[in-house]
Amino acid sequence: QVQLVESGGGLVQAGGSLRLSCETSVSIRSFAVMSWYRQAPGKQRELVAALTGADTTNFADSVKGRFTISRDNAKNTLYLQMNSLKPEDTAVYYCKGQLILRGVYDYWGQGTQVTVSS
C-alpha cells in the first residue's frame, strides 16, 4: 500500500524557516512527479512546488526564490525547504506523489500545519 507521511510543520515567526519532509512507503523513484500543495482556511488547495523524475522543478510564483524542493532517494523522502516565511504562507501543507502505471494514480499525505506569525 502506498503511503505518504509528512512532518516538519509548526509555528514560526515571519522571516523564519522550516523544512517539511514527506516519507514514502515505496521507492520515491517510482513516482513520476512529487509535489507539495497547501490549503489555507477558506481557500482552494494550490500547488506550491513540484519535482519530476527528471529533476525538473516548478514553483508557484508566490514562493519562487524562497522555497526549494528536493528529494533523498536513499531515504525515500521529499523535502520542502521554506525560507523567508510570510504570514500568507500559513496553511496545511500536503505531499502528493503521482504514479503512472497504465493510468495516473495520485497519492496524498495527511498534511502538516504551518503557521507563520507576524
Image (cartoon, rainbow, N blue to C red):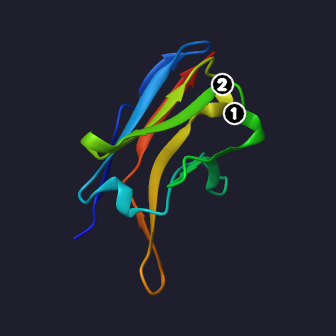
Q: Is residue 79 above or below residue 110?
A: above
Residue drawn at point x = 27 percent, y = 66 percent: 2
The answer to which image quadrant residue 13 occupies is top right
Q: Amino acid at mark 2?
A: Arg
Residues marked 1 and 2 touching at CB (< 8 Å) = yes
- The mark found on residue 17 in the picture is none
Residue drawn at point x = 58 percent, y = 33 percent: 90
Q: Is residue 37 left or right of residue 107?
A: right
Judge the density around disc 1: few (<14), some (14-19), many (≥20) Cα neighbours within 10 Å. Answer: some
Extreme residue in the right direction: 61
Q: Is residue 34 above or below residue 91?
A: below
The answer to which image quadrant residue 52 occupies is bottom right
Q: Amino acid at mark 1?
A: Val
Q: CA distance from mark 1 to mark 2?
A: 5 Å
Which residue corresponds to mark 1?
A: 63
**Camera-nearest residue between 110 and 59:** 59
Q: Position of residue 15 (x, y in %)?
A: 61, 12
Q: Is residue 68 above or below residue 1?
A: above
Q: Position of residue 53 (x, y in %)?
A: 50, 55
Q: Give the position of the C terminus as an image quadrant.
A: top right
Which residue corresponds to mark 2?
A: 66
Residue drawn at point x = 77 percent, y = 39 percent: 61
Q: Position of residue 26 (x, y in %)?
A: 25, 60
Q: Is residue 47 above or below residue 118?
A: below
**Camera-nearest residue between 41 and 88:** 88
